[in-house]
Amino acid sequence: QVQLVESGGGLVQAGGSLRLSCAASGLTFSRAIMGWFRQAPGKERDFVATIIRSGGSEYYADSVMGRFTISRDNAKNTVYLQMNSLKPEDTAVYYCAALVSFGSSWYVRPDEYAYWGQGTQVTVSS
């Protein structure tokens, strides 16, 4: 059974930083493409960032480019999202997601991911 467990969310002032973690189990982590998504109240779930299996390349939504960094530690079965220069509009529930694929595309749609965590709340105050 695949489990993804996020942690690290919380309340932070604008301009501050948070680091989210997502611990994975029940899958061969090194074969999984990992992604972060977020969902604000009343809005759709949006793509934030994704990282390839080896961790050597990442892709970001325009809204977080230059502020957020996705990384992974395959030895720890964990993916991270370092969030800097946070803005009130970054407030959302953040979800990590996984898919096992040998493709070479960037996967940015929620329906492309097979496994999801329960989410962690990030609130940025102005």
Image (cartoon, grey):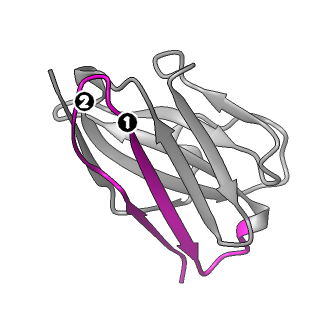
Does dot 1 land on a helix, a strand or a loop?
loop
Q: Which of the pair 99/62 is nearer the observer?
A: 62
- The residue that appears at 63% across and 40% down in the rendered structure is 50
* In the rendered image, the vertical position of residue 88 relative to residue 119, given as above or below: above
Residue span colored magenta: 1-29
- The residue that appears at 24% across and 32% down in the rendered structure is 91
- Left/right placement of residue 50 relative to residue 64 reads right
- Left/right placement of residue 99 relative to residue 18 reads right
Which residue is the site of mark 2? 43
Residue 124 spot, x, y in % from top left: 21, 31
Residue type, label 1? Ser
Which residue is the site of mark 1? 17
Q: Nearer the viewer, mark 1 or mark 2?
A: 1
* In the rendered image, the vertical position of residue 31 relative to residue 95, given as above or below: below
* In the rendered image, the vertical position of residue 61 relative to residue 1, given as above or below: above
* Neighbourhood count class around disc 2 (C-alpha, 10 Å): few under 14, some 14–19, many 20 upward: few
- The residue that appears at 59% across and 46% down in the rendered structure is 112
* Neighbourhood count class around disc 1 (C-alpha, 10 Å): few under 14, some 14–19, many 20 upward: some
* In the rendered image, the vertical position of residue 85 relative to residue 72, given as above or below: above
- Left/right placement of residue 79 relative to residue 101 reads left
Residue 56 spot, x, y in % from top left: 82, 43
Where the C terminus falls, by quadrant? top left
Q: Which of the pair 15/27 is nearer the observer?
A: 15
Residue 71 spot, x, y in % from top left: 65, 47
Does dot 2 land on a helix, a strand or a loop?
loop
Residue 43 spot, x, y in % from top left: 24, 29
Q: Which of the pair 51/123 is nearer the observer?
A: 123
Residue 23 is a magenta residue? yes
Distance in Å between CA atoms under marks 1 and 2? 23 Å
Q: Which of the pair 116/25 is nearer the observer?
A: 25
Question: Residue 46 lies in what quarter of the image?
Answer: top left
- The residue that appears at 37% across and 36% down in the rendered structure is 17
